[in-house]
Image (cartoon, helix red, strand yellow):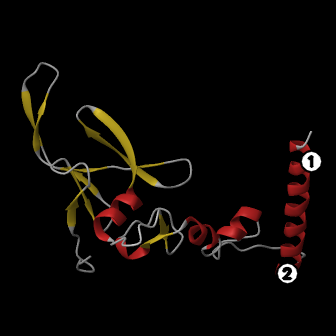
Amino acid sequence: MFYIKNKEVWKPIFGYEDLYEISNYGRVKSIERLVKSNNNNFRLQKESIRKPTVNNRGYFSIRLCKNGKYKAQFIHRLVAIAFIDNPNNLPEVNHKDEDKKNNRVENLEWCTRKYNMNYGTVKDKIIGIYVPPNVKKKSKYTTSELYELRLEKARKDAKLAEHISHK
């Protein structure tokens, strides 16, 4: 889909048209509208940028309300649905730079579960051998020795888990 790089573009959120919009930068805003208050009067709710929360897995999400019902939505999925074509109906959205909080459209892509799980350093993170580039480590072991030690530990943990699950 078309958008201008370095310019914020807003589009309606699918299923919440006339209520909320999402930008190519990953920001959500509530559209100015009349809302019913508790005493059955109507009040003007002004347009406002909504503040997302971070879930326990590190992803930004936002609670959207329609007809009195709230639903949490992942920001990266809202951006992808609004701005990235998905002709193959791929189920997941990948963060190209692996930063779950970077929800700009140019950092996102539709993908398969397998692609997402094998992307970048995700496998290293799962078995505990990934060290972020900005972390300085002092060790008596070389990088390849640490890799082998952690790989061996992961194998032992997997065997133990399998043994426990068969009891």
Q: In this view, does 124 lie above or below 43?
A: below
Position of 55 relative to 123 (above/below): above
Numbered badge on residue 163: 1
Q: Residue at x 50, y 48 (%)?
A: 55
Residue 144, labelled with which disc?
A: 2
The kind of residue tagged 1 is His
Q: In this view, does 71 lie above or below 21?
A: above
Q: In this view, does 134 lie to the left or right of 90?
A: right
Residue beneath the point at 29% across and 69% down: 83
Choose the circle earlier in sequence order: 2 or 1.
2
Q: Depth-wise, is mark 2 or mark 1 nearer the camera?
A: 1
- CA–CA distance between discs 2 and 1? 29 Å
Quadrant placement of the N terminus = bottom left
Left or right of residue 39: residue 22:
right
- Left or right of residue 163: residue 100: left
Amino acid beneath label 2: Ser
Q: Where is residue 19 in the image (x, y as percent from the top left)?
A: 19, 47
**Residue at (17%, 21%) from the top-left corner?**
38
The answer to whether mark 2 and mark 1 are in CB contact below 8 A is: no
Q: Where is residue 89 in the image (x, y as percent from the top left)?
A: 41, 66
Residue 22 in view here: yes
